[in-house]
Amino acid sequence: MASSQTFPVVVRTEIDYRRPAKLGDKLVVHGWLESVERLRFWCGFEIRRPADDMVIATSRQMLAVIQMPAGKPVRLPEDWGTRFAHLRPTRD
């Protein structure tokens, strides 16, 4: 990224808080790729407390890739959807 001067940036974040977490709780974050579009992609997240298997929060983020120093959005490569398919959740 540094050599090409292209960087991912968070454009939008949505969070649903389900349960409180307490100081000292061990939490696990699971992340996955939701979708890839021409100029942006979405990632999903789930934060879970393994001690009681409770979902603490769910989240999704929209990201874009920008070219610096101009700060202009870069079109995502057409193969991203297949190249990163392993990051998508499997359907049962």
Image: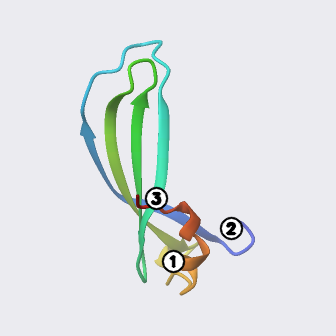
CA distance for labels 2 and 1: 19 Å
* Eye-nearest disc, 3 or 1: 3
Q: Residue furthest front?
A: 92
Residue 78, above or below 18: below
Q: How many marks?
A: 3
What residue is at 58 percent from the left and 72 percent from the top? 68
Judged left or right of residue 92, residue 76 is right
Pointer 1: what residue? 81
Q: Are marks 3 and 1 in contact (CB under 8 Å)?
A: no
Mark identifier at residue 1: 2
Judged left or right of residue 83, residue 45 is left
The amino acid beneath tag 2 is Met
Q: Nearer the viewer, residue 45 or 14?
A: 45
Pointer 3: what residue? 89
Q: Residues within 10 Å of mark 3 (few under 14, many from 20)?
A: few
Could you say whether the residue bearing mark 2 is in a helix, strand or loop?
A: loop
Q: Earlier in the sequence, mark 2 or mark 1?
A: 2
Q: Nearer the viewer, residue 14 or 79?
A: 79
Image location of residue 12, percent across then percent down: 33, 58
